[in-house]
Amino acid sequence: MVFELDRISSLLDLLGSPQRAYPSIHLTGTNGKTSTARMIDSLLRAFGLHTGRYTSPHLETVRERISLDGEPVDETRFTAVYREVKPLAELVDDRSAEPLTYFDITTALAFATFADAPVDVAVVEVGLGGAEDSTNVLQAGVCVLTPVGLDHTEWLGDTLQDIALAKAGIIHSGATVICAAQEEEAARPILERCAEVGATVAREGSEFGVLRRAVAVGGQVLTLQGLGGVYDEVFVPLHGAHQAQNAAVALAAVEAFLGAGARRQLDVDAVREGFAAATSPGRLERVRTAPTILLDGAHNPQGMAATVTALQEEFAFSKLVAVVGTLADKDAASLLELLEPVVDQVVVTRNSSPRALPAGELAALAAEVFGPERVEVAEQMPDAIEAAVALAEEDVPGELAGVGVLITGSVVTVADARRLLKR
């Protein structure tokens, strides 16, 4: 992967700069970007706006990355826009030392699709980092930073400061920045970037945040402090304190975009409607019952810690078996260590990514953490799910209400399982 903006800028110039046809909300961070983007999208639609949303990666089809009014772009529109972009992309490739990347192309397709629709606002998630990401041609008026942690260190640096500095690159002159609570090492470069370019920053815990949260059937009920006031009795159909934090960030971003603040609060009923309609596939998503099967795409220690906390707080499993498949460049040992206290047994497998960690290597790591007697190996996802369900149901008398299977470790792992279980 070659990170620079010249190629995508050239392509967008040839397309007539479609990214300038609408205002944007631009998101970066390590965890929570997609969930937050989806909440922002749902809130904006509750206020009657036509939205475009660009997120990655996808679970089942590339069309999920490019959504119009909350739905993946249809095949006819997707292929029509691709036919417009393709010859211009080939022209850019002919002129460049390096070809456009897959992400460059999907970014151009998204921006062109949004301009053609047209949308009132685009909600755009960074692919990797920020400063040199293909999406950083937007210079958006509202920028969002979700919590920054250690991930993609081979490209972004091996300290929180380096990673935060890269991500803060999406902040441009005059922007309003909505920043989730950060560790001090990450907060410093973000605030320095805001000062450097004259951006206004609102921080979780100072200008906005979660005042109260209570577990509810199918999610949680929140009281949120927004930029414009307090919003109570907000039901969010997603699990975990991390999703409550994402909701607070999403609300502040929408308030900033719609001009709410000290003198004006958003309509509370519209906010409730927007959050109630929010979804986040693959994030503690329940896809089966008896036994309960949950899918969660946690793939780094920060994300897995949030998942484990949510499992402990919001689910009362008497027995839980995990299916785990990770990528080779991830900290699989830390993921397993975080899972161990809440999981009775683990089935390790290999997901469909070319970058997947082989099941045998993952099994060796798991045996060190769980002990060999609590680890099984299944090379293929169908076999892994079957083995996990059998283990979950083993020696359980009567009802299976307290029995569960968690499939996790990578978005690719979740995607593989989801294709099988959602048929």
Image: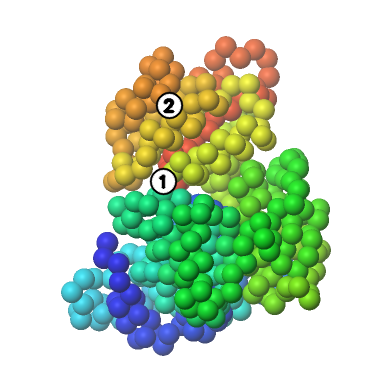
As drawn, 179 above or below 264: above
Task: Give the camera-side residue of 214 and 58.
Answer: 214
The mark nearer the N terminus, 2 or 1, is 2
From the image, tell me which residue sits under label 2: 347
Relative side of 38 to 362, left or right? right
Which image quadrant is residue 259 in?
A: bottom right
Task: Give the camera-side residue of 34 and 393.
Answer: 34
Mark 1 Cα-neighbour bin, 10 Å: few <14, some 14–19, many ≥20: many
As drawn, 16 above or below 103: below
Residue 393 seen in the current view: yes
Amino acid found under the numbered disc labelled 2: Val
Q: What's the residue at 63%, 32% (across, down)?
A: 312
Q: Which mark is residue 340?
A: none
From the image, tell me which residue sits under label 1: 412
Relative side of 361 to 333, left or right? left
Q: What's the residue at 41%, 63% (across, down)?
A: 165
Q: What's the residue at 71%, 42% (across, down)?
A: 218
Which image quadrant is residue 102 in?
A: bottom left
Q: Secondary structure at mark 2?
A: strand
How far, Cα to Cα, is label 2 from label 1?
16 Å
Relative side of 25 to 97, left or right? right
Q: Secondary structure at mark 1?
A: helix
Which quadrant holds the N terminus?
Answer: bottom left
Q: What's the residue at 44%, 60% (across, down)?
A: 164
Amino acid found under the numbered disc labelled 1: Val
